[in-house]
Image (cartoon, grey):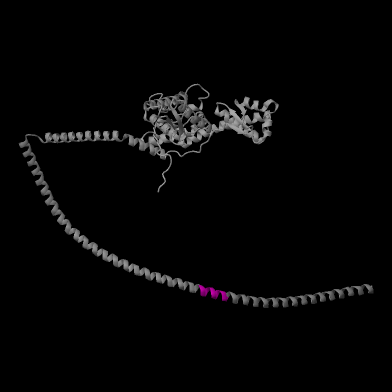
Amino acid sequence: MAQTSFLVCLVLVSVVCGIIFDKYQVNQKIKKAEKAAKDYLIQNNIKVTNECSAIIKESHQETENYRLNTQEDIDYQAKENSNRQQRIEQREHYLSQTKDRLLEYAEYLKSQESDIDDAQQELSKLQDNAESLLEQRASLLASQSQISKHDAKEDILNAAKNELSREKDVEIRYQNEEIKANANKIANDLIIDSIQRGPKDEPRNHIDKSVLLPNGDIKLKLIMHDEQCLRIIESLTGTDLLFDERDPLLLQIATHDPIRREITRNVLEKLIISRQITPNGIEKQVNISTQNVHNELRAVGEHAARILNLKHVNPDLLKILGKLKFRTSYGQNVLYHSIEVAQIAGILASELGLNVNLARRAGVFHDIGKAIDHEIDGTHVELGVDLTTAFGEDDVVINAIASHHGDVEADNLISKLVATADAISGARPGARSESVEEYVNRLKSLEHIANEQSGVKESYAIQAGREIRIIVNPELVDDQQSQKITDNVRNRIENELVYPGKIKVTTIRKLRAVQYVGKRKKIAK
């Protein structure tokens, strides 16, 4: 029992001691916290004081700056107000002066108004007197001339009409005579102006009729197995392929169809590039080239129509027009020739006040028959008329095609303009050319025809074959025979040769008498 009491007392003492110790620790923490709080308060007071000082200083600086700026604005506004006040005073002074002048002018107008009223009254009196005088004069004239006023008026008008009619007849007669006298000059000036304003010369594009192989390997692939590849190309394109005897690598394309020639040329060029010269490769390239060439025909026709600003042209007719790109006449590309004719005809039509678009349309289609003359029998004029009729072209266009070579009579001015433009385009310098071989053969043929005539000593084809000069033996040929030789040569050239433009035949007979005096020169002493 006593031991238990001791333990209880010990526990109580321990508890009391613990409580006292805890209280002591709490008091120590409180003191530390109070000290830390005092230090924090002191530091914060110092920090706040510094910040407040900085803010107050900054505020004072900003206030001073604002005051300065505001003072400047106030001074500027005061100066502006002063200027405005001066302008207002000047304007008021000006208005005051204007008001005084207006008042003075109003007084002047009032005085003038009274003068005008007096003048109007005087004028009315004069008008009344004038009218009475006119009436008296008219009655006096009527009584003396025994004719009424209406009849006199009719006589004067009739006399004026007769006079004007005579003057009109004289002027019309003068203008007609002037036009007849200057018609050729006016026409020449108009044609020269149309040529100068017309199309520019296009680079000459000759149609290639051969393909040059790059080396013998390509030729070997084409001719191996009994020329099987060449025969396949010929059967698929409808052309004949022949190697040139002078150049073993030059492959000639023989056909009358320019479209087939172009397709064949494209096929050969693509085969040379791809080097896949096999039956399947040839058939593939033929199909591709055929499609490309036909697409190009349509594009070429559309381009020509776009250049000439043609509207509502049938697509099939445009494709046929595109074929003219591969057609030539005396070395002149027919498509470029047709575009040139259309442009010249359009310029002439504009100068004469005619339908320009219709003239261009007739000009570009005037040789359309040449696109199919190798496929269908008939002249290019007949084929062109049939084509344009089938596609519903205007009657003026059809007549222009039919009459541009004089086969039928032109029934409108545009047809005559197209024929004129066609002659200009074909005959202008540099329009047409021929190959060197044809050129040389033509010169030789001219000289051969001349040299076959009896009495001819020698002959020369000059000016690119546009003139042949024949020199005869004057001892064997007289003047009458010279004229006969000239006529014979002209007739043979006209009947036997094909030539562009005109050829001038000139026969020269000149007798020279030459004698020499003395056998040697005299020596001066």
Where in the figure is residue 409, as x and y percent of width and height? 38, 24
403 over 82 or under it: above or below: above
Tag count in the figure? 0
Res. 216 image quadrant: top right
Q: Which residues are magenta?
A: 56-65
199 over 233 or under it: above or below: below
- The reply, left or right, for residue 291 in relation to residue 160 is right
Where in the figure is residue 14, as x and y percent of width and height? 87, 74
- The reply, left or right, for residue 282 in relation to residue 381 is right
Q: Is residue 25 visible?
A: yes
- Classify the position of the N terminus by image quarter: bottom right
Q: Residue furthest top?
A: 377
- The reply, left or right, for residue 264 in relation to residue 139 is right
Q: Residue furthest front?
A: 525
- Provide the major secondary structure of the magenta segment: helix
Of 499 and 328, nearer the camera is 499
Res. 79 image quadrant: bottom left
Of 476 and 429, nearer the camera is 476
Q: Residue furthest left?
A: 144
Residue 62 inside the magenta-drawn segment: yes
Where in the figure is residue 236, as x and y percent of width and height? 62, 26
Q: Is residue 395 visible?
A: no
Residue 93 inside the magenta-drawn segment: no
Q: Residue at x 36, y 38 (%)?
A: 189
Where in the figure is residue 232, as x and y percent of width and height? 65, 26
Res. 417 image quadrant: top left
